[in-house]
Image: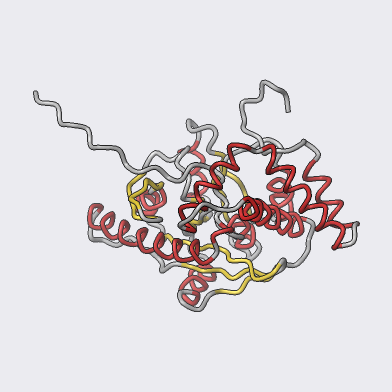
């Protein structure tokens, strides 16, 4: 990638994913894991901004200043998840088990073949779920940011290419046309709904003790295209197994746009409450090494005419 390439890139050298993939495959497991632990300390020392955001987040969720070892564990939990993605990308089997709370409704929607909107967050194994949904024979367009130095996404996309395609948000001018084309082709859409960079629709919801802005676009798309929406996150149970925790299914009805949006806000708040419970149970699995979602600003005073 040239230095003039405007795309963001993942930290680390351009050959990093290739090295990790091959080292994990050929080295004894104990030796590779020791090297991964050491590499995480190196990453921690160089990634100052991410280290600061990890500290701020952990201080909030733990209700005390985190120790350096806890920040390292936060980084290492992400390294562990990266290796899970790389193993799936080279064909290592991965098992998903549905949490029984809302599992039957989620399973019924997936098996129905009806195009739907699947939302998730940067938590645990969630970034893998869109590919695994494609593995169940459901045509799926994943809405993602195009990032340089991202071999994990490229390899997974190649493995699941029969069912999974990408819509890149980096070019907002073409995004509406790509969305319309995917929906008209009968594809479901999958998107992560916690980062605000490319969201045109954000609203405040209660999360981690404050009202914070979250993308709300998925519900506007649900109303626009008359598609059900559901959220799911992945809690790792082992390096080869994930517990999928799903929300109730939100389905637009004939009550009108405003009534549906009110119902959608209640649905999303319940989703975030469920997510917060999981975050507090598994604080190291929140993989947003960014500032926490901001609080809404003060309302703009009305201008008198």
Q: Quadrant of residue 149?
A: top right
Q: Nearer the viewer, residue 89 or 184?
A: 89
Q: Is residue 284 above or below residue 181?
A: below
Q: Residue at x 55, y 34 (%)?
A: 170
**Where is residue 25 drawn, in percent x and y?**
86, 57
For the N terminus, give its image quadrant: top right
Q: Nearer the viewer, residue 45 or 21?
A: 45
Q: Nearer the viewer, residue 103 or 27?
A: 27
Q: Residue furthest left?
A: 305
Q: Is residue 164 visible?
A: yes
Q: Residue furthest top?
A: 4
Q: Quadrant of residue 2?
A: top right
Q: Is residue 111 left or right of residue 273?
A: right
**Where is residue 12 drawn, in percent x and y?**
73, 38
Coloring basis for residues? secondary structure
Q: Is residue 167 left or right of residue 262?
A: right
**Where is residue 219 drawn, in percent x and y?**
37, 53
**Where is residue 281 drawn, in percent x and y?**
51, 67
Q: Residue at x 36, y 48 (%)?
A: 212
Q: Is residue 190 visible?
A: no
């Amino acid at each position: 990638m040239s230095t003039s390439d405007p795309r963001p890139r993942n930290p680390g050298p351009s050959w990093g994913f290739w090295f990790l993939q091959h080292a994990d495959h050929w080295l004894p497991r104990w030796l590779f894991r020791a090297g991964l632990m050491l590499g995480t300390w190196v990453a921690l020392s160089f990634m100052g901004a991410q280290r600061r955001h990890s500290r701020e987040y952990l201080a909030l969720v733990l209700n005390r200043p985190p120790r350096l070892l806890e920040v390292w564990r936060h980084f290492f939990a992400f390294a562990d998840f990266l290796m899970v993605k790389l193993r799936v990308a080279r064909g290592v089997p991965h098992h998903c088990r549905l949490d029984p709370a809302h599992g039957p409704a989620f399973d019924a929607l997936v098996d129905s073949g009806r195009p739907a909107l699947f939302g998730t967050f940067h938590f645990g194994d969630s970034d893998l779920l869109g590919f695994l949904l494609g593995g169940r024979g459901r045509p799926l367009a994943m809405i993602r940011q195009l990032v340089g130095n991202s071999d994990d996404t490229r390899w997974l996309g190649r493995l699941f290419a029969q069912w999974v395609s990408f819509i890149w948000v980096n070019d907002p001018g073409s995004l509406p046309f790509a969305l319309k084309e995917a929906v008209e082709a009968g594809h479901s859409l999958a998107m992560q709904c916690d980062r605000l960079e490319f969201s045109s629709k954000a609203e405040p919801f209660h999360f981690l003790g404050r009202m914070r802005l979250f993308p709300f676009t998925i519900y506007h798309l649900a109303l626009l295209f008359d598609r059900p929406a559901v959220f799911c996150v992945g809690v790792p149970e082992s390096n080869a197994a994930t517990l999928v925790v799903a929300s109730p299914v939100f389905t637009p009805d004939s009550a009108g746009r405003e009534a549906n949006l009110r119902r959608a806000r209640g649905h999303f708040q319940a989703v975030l409450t469920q997510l917060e419970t999981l975050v507090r149970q598994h604080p190291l699995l929140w993989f947003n090494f960014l500032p926490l979602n901001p609080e809404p600003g003060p309302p703009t005073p009305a201008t008198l005419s």
